[in-house]
Amino acid sequence: MGDFTRRAFLIAPAVGTVAAHLTLLADEKPAVLGGKPVRKMKYPGWPIFDQREEQALLTALRSGKWFRGNGKEVSRFEEAYAKVTGAKFCLATANGTSALFTSLKAVDVGPGDEVLIPPYTFVATLNVVLLQHALPVWVDVDPETCQMDARKVQAAVTERTRAIIPVHYGGNPADLDAILAIAKKRNLRVIEDACQAHLAAWRGRNVGNWGDTGCFSFQASKNLNSGEGGAIITNNETLMDRCYSFHNQGRKRKGGGDDEFSYSSPGNNLRLTEFQAAVLLAQMTRLEEQSKTREQNAQYLNNMLKEIPGVMPQRSYDGCTRHNQHTYVFRYDQEKFAGMTKPRLLKALTAEGIPARGGYTPLNKVEFLKRVMQSRIYRNLYPKERLAQLEQIECPGNEKLCREAVVFSHNVLMAPRSEMELIVEAVRKVQAHAAEIAKT
Ligand SMILES: *Cc1c(COP(=O)(O)O)cnc(C)c1O
């Protein structure tokens, strides 16, 4: 009640009394049933840019040096990003997917190997494993944190396991202490999928520095973006040499020029362009400040939303010292919302002016995976029993999370603080009318 009293004055000062505000919430018809929405304003758009990006792009354009082989922007960006993340080495790549793929190559994951991944992630985490003809082995997630459940890693390890890819989903660090301990014990490589976690930190040190490599994405939806783009960070120079070489057609990182015809190993072309690096350098001037805004708003939202019965904001592990809020997630308890299904809840919140989304659907159940497991190549590479076993892996934590998660994109957290209060008001209003809405 204490919180409600404070909230009532915060969000409805004109009403004056708590009682009046309570009546207001209960009386007001939900927008999804034809009432007035709680808010109408548009949230800040994404991306955000100004003359800084325009100037940077023009400079790169006019230089006539458009690729890393003769330009300076990509190297400048790598230096700057290594500094921001506190890593010894950084390699820019074409995108986050190629950062992950290159890392798997560098730690020698290939056909016949098993790789542990969580099912609550973007499809790229799965795709890079399949592209190496390695076997993806699901480790269930902890619905409270949305991360790979470290307590379930040990049981998933076999003699074929080569690597673990913990995903710092939403910018919330995975349980790195526990995952690294098992990796060490079983001699496994760790590739951090930090594609959503640009400034996230674990025990005061940025994520991406804890595993063998850390991979980032600068795709348009991400908190740091150049339309497309990616990066690998590592503190291991041998790995950096291998990553560089693979991403640049097998050319040597040191000693060989970028346009020389001298190759030390097979490779790919996964280079970032000078234009993207120029945009990233400009975008980076705002990264810290934008992130602080999101983090402060998320804290504020957490404190208010957790007071609502049946609303459970995402938890972070004790080792998390920075959650960089690529997304904001809370789970709802259907029973405290009169049995309302998630599609109805999302529709009701969206009608109130809150663009709520449902998050990921179970990746371990994705249709094409069965076909891959039954394909000629996989049948040649893996014992039939192992492939059959993998189809049986259940992820109840992930199912629960997929059923209960409500997700806001990071731009929602860039709105003024008063907008966070309206989100809370919308959730309370929808809950107050849950029975009517659930019936529709
Ligand atoms: C975005 C993302 C990727 C892939 O990054 P791209 O730059 O789009 O290739 C991989 N993993 C996760 C968790 C992501 O969010």
Image (cartoon, rainbow, N blue to C red):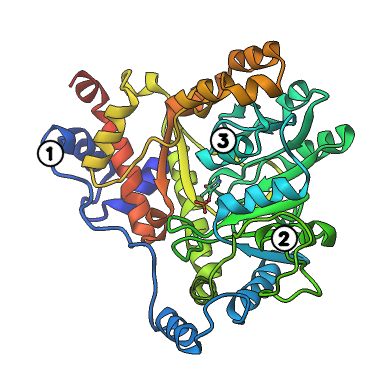
Number of disc labels:
3
* Mark 3 burial class by Cα count in 10 Å: few <14, some 14-19, many 20+: many
Residue 399 percent location from the top left of the image:
50, 22
Q: In this rendering, does residue 310 appear at all?
A: no
Residue 390 percent location from the top left of the image:
63, 18
**Amino acid type of disc 2?**
Gly
- In screen coordinates, is 177 left or right of 39? right
Q: Label 2's element? A: loop
Q: CA distance from mark 2 to mark 1?
A: 62 Å
Residue visible at 89% across and 33% down in the picture: 185
Q: Answer with the quarter of the image where residue 42 lies.
A: bottom left
* Up/down of 409 relative to 205, above or below: above
Nearest-to-viewer mark from 1 and 3: 3
Q: In this rendering, does residue 78 appear at all?
A: yes
Q: Which mark is residue 411?
A: none
Whichever of labels 1 and 3 marks the residue nearer the N terminus, that label is 1
Q: Which mark is residue 146?
A: 3
What residue sits right under mark 1 in the picture? Answer: 35
- In screen coordinates, is 151 left or right of 326? right
Whichever of labels 3 and 2 marks the residue nearer the N terminus, that label is 3
**Amino acid type of disc 1?**
Gly
Q: Label 3's element? A: loop
Q: CA distance from mark 1 to mark 3?
A: 34 Å
Residue visible at 54% across and 73% down in the picture: 277
Q: Which mark is residue 250?
A: 2
* Up/down of 165 relative to 243, above or below: above
Q: Quadrant of the N terminus?
A: top left
Whichever of labels 2 and 1 marks the residue nearer the N terminus, that label is 1
In the image, 214 versus 168, the foreground residue is 214
